[in-house]
């Protein structure tokens, strides 16, 4: 009697942007609101949280609107997808580790209007 065996391996993994694209190291050393944070928020958040009728009344298209959400802890909670917050972007891909690091560095610096 002869038996055939099939062996299969599969796995899930999460790549880091820095590993996949080694030439594009994340540089958060010069993170400013105007040059770094606002463009990230504009491209990932403002389709819902911008304009005249922002979703949930949360406007993120101005410094004042973003700063309000930073001060109450909801911006970081939502974009880092912490358990107690509604994960943002809603029904979208989580921001890259690099973009999260840049925003966190800006928040930790006091979220200046620079």
Image: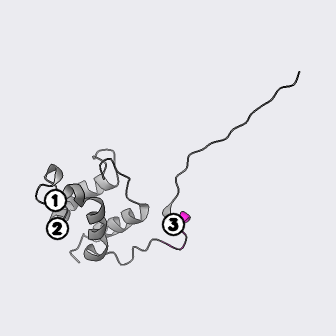
Q: Is residue 34 left or right of residue 14?
A: left
Secondary structure category for the residue under label 3: helix
Viewer-proximal residue among 107 and 99: 99
Whole-percent x, y for residue 98 in the image: 42, 65
Quarter of the picture containing the C terminus is bottom left
Q: Which comes sooner in the sequence, label 3 or label 2?
A: 3
- Mark 2, other Cα within 10 Å: few <14 / some 14–19 / many ≥20: few
Report the residue marked by disc 3. Answer: 18
Q: From where the camera sits, is residue 76 visible?
A: yes
Residue at 80% over, 29% down: 4
Q: Which residues are magenta?
A: 19-25
Quarter of the picture containing the N terminus is top right
Dominant secondary structure (helix, strand or loop) of the stretch shown in magenta: loop
Q: Is residue 21 left or right of residue 75?
A: right
Residue at 36% over, 78% down: 30
Query: Between marks 1 and 3, how big is the CA–CA gap?
Result: 31 Å
Q: From where the camera sits, is residue 73 visible?
A: no
Query: Between marks 1 and 2, how big is the CA–CA gap?
Result: 7 Å
Report the residue marked by disc 2. Answer: 62
Query: Between marks 3 and 2, how big is the CA–CA gap?
Result: 30 Å
Q: How is the image coloured?
A: one colour
Residue at 43% over, 74% down: 27
- Mark 1, other Cα within 10 Å: few <14 / some 14–19 / many ≥20: many
* On screen, residue 17 above or below 83: below
In the rendered image, residue 15 lying in the magenta stretch gets the answer no
Report the residue marked by disc 1. Answer: 59
């Amino acid at each position: 009697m002869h038996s055939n065996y099939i062996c299969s391996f599969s796995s899930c993994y999460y790549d880091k942007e820095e590993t996949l694209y080694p030439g594009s190291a994340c540089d958060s050393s010069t993170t400013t609101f105007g040059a770094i944070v606002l463009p990230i928020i504009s491209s990932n958040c403002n389709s819902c949280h911008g304009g005249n009728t922002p979703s949930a009344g949360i406007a993120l298209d101005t410094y004042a609107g973003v700063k309000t959400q930073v001060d109450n802890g909801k911006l970081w909670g939502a974009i880092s997808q912490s358990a107690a917050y509604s994960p943002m972007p809603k029904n979208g891909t989580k921001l890259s580790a690099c973009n999260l690091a840049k925003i966190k560095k800006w928040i930790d610096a006091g979220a200046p209007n620079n």
